[in-house]
Every structure is written in structure tokens, then in C-alpha cells.
């Protein structure tokens, strides 16, 4: 068989259900913690760059080790809660991004497998149409609409 599957790891119905249930639980657990910022708010509040993270870390270090030098105008309980939540979110985002990257990579392989198989089927259909086999010419014509702009008789590469 000329077609080679790159990824044979398919999801069972039970695995899909387990994953969907876990995502449902995650969405429920995060529902009250997520923020929905407008584009303007995202621009205004931005992202704390690495230099500014060093400032935050140094201020926290001073507060932890020499609290008498810290501003009494700061709610330090809230500061520490924000610091802890920020660190937790960053770690969780990295874990989820790793999962997303792995899922995207697996999807790429499945897409490639499907596309390669579809091209093989199209080539087979063109061959069968050339032998006047019944029913293949309309299939070739329908599939051919997706390959406009290519030389006649050529099959695209995935």
C-alpha cells in the first residue's frame, strides 16, 4: 500500500468522554477566575516584562525578609495573594500550552494522513475514470475543483 500512516494513536469513545469530562471540570473550576479583557484593557494593562518581574520579585523579597522597609500603603496580603495566583497561573498556562502543542502536533499528523489518503483516492479515481469505469468521472470532476491552477494530470503533494 503506497499510503503510510504517520499516527496510529486514535481516541476511543471512552477516552474522548474522559477528556471531554476533564475539560468540562476545568472550565467549571475556572469559570469564576477568568478575566475577559477588551483589546483596550489588554493594551492598557499589558504584560509585565521580564525586567518588571524582577522588580516585583525584589519587592517581595524585601517584604519577606525586611518588612519594616515596606510601604504601609500596600495591602501585603493582597500582594502575596496576587503573587501566588500569578505564579500558579503561569505554571498552569505552561502545562496547558505543552498539552496544546502536543495536540496540535498530533492533529497535524492526522491531517497529513487524511490528506495523503485523499490524494491517493483521487489518483485512483482518475485512473478508474481513464478506463471508463462507471461512476468515477463525476467523482474526478468534483474533486478536481479543489486542484485548479495545477497542470492537468498532476496531483499536489501534501
Image: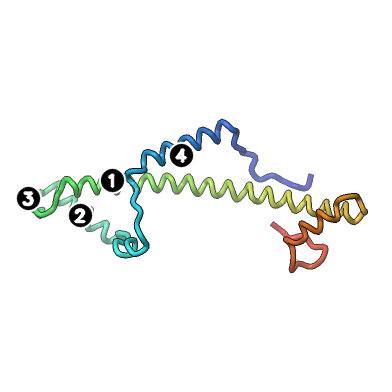
Marks 1 and 2 close (CB-CB < 8 Å): no
CA–CA distance in space, label 3 to label 4: 45 Å
Q: Which mark is residue 68?
A: 3
Q: Nearer the viewer, residue 98 or 114?
A: 114
Indicate the quadrant containing the C terminus: top left, top right, bottom left or bottom right.
Answer: bottom right
Q: Report how many numbered discs are placed on residues in the image.
A: 4
Q: Is residue 103 above or below residue 140?
A: above
Dot 4 crowding, Cα within 10 Å, few <14, some 14–19, many 20+? few
Marks 2 and 4 close (CB-CB < 8 Å): no
Marks 2 and 3 close (CB-CB < 8 Å): no
Q: Earlier in the sequence, mark 3 or mark 4?
A: 4
Q: Residue at x 63, y 47 (%)?
A: 110
Q: Secondary structure at mark 2?
A: helix
Q: Which residue in the protein does label 2 denote?
A: 58
CA–CA distance in space, label 1 to label 4: 21 Å
Q: Is residue 11 above or below residue 46?
A: above
Q: Which residue in the protein does label 4 denote?
A: 23
Residue positioned most to the left: 68
Amino acid at each position: 500500500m503506497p499510503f503510510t500512516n504517520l499516527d496510529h494513536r486514535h481516541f476511543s469513545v471512552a477516552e474522548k468522554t474522559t477528556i471531554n469530562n476533564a475539560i468540562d471540570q476545568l472550565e467549571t473550576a475556572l469559570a469564576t477566575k477568568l478575566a475577559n479583557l477588551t483589546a483596550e484593557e489588554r493594551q492598557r494593562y499589558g504584560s509585565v516584562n521580564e525586567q518588571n518581574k524582577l522588580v516585583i520579585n525584589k519587592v517581595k523579597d524585601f517584604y519577606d525578609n525586611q518588612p519594616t522597609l515596606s510601604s504601609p500603603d500596600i495591602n501585603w496580603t493582597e500582594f502575596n495573594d496576587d503573587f501566588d495566583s500569578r505564579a500558579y497561573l503561569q505554571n498552569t498556562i505552561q502545562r496547558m500550552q505543552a498539552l496544546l502543542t502536543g495536540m496540535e502536533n498530533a492533529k497535524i499528523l492526522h491531517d497529513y494522513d487524511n490528506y495523503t489518503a485523499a490524494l491517493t483516492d483521487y489518483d485512483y479515481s482518475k485512473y478508474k475514470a481513464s478506463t471508463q469505469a462507471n461512476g468515477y468521472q463525476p467523482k474526478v470532476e468534483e474533486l478536481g475543483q479543489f486542484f485548479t491552477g495545477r497542470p492537468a494530470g498532476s496531483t499536489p503533494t501534501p
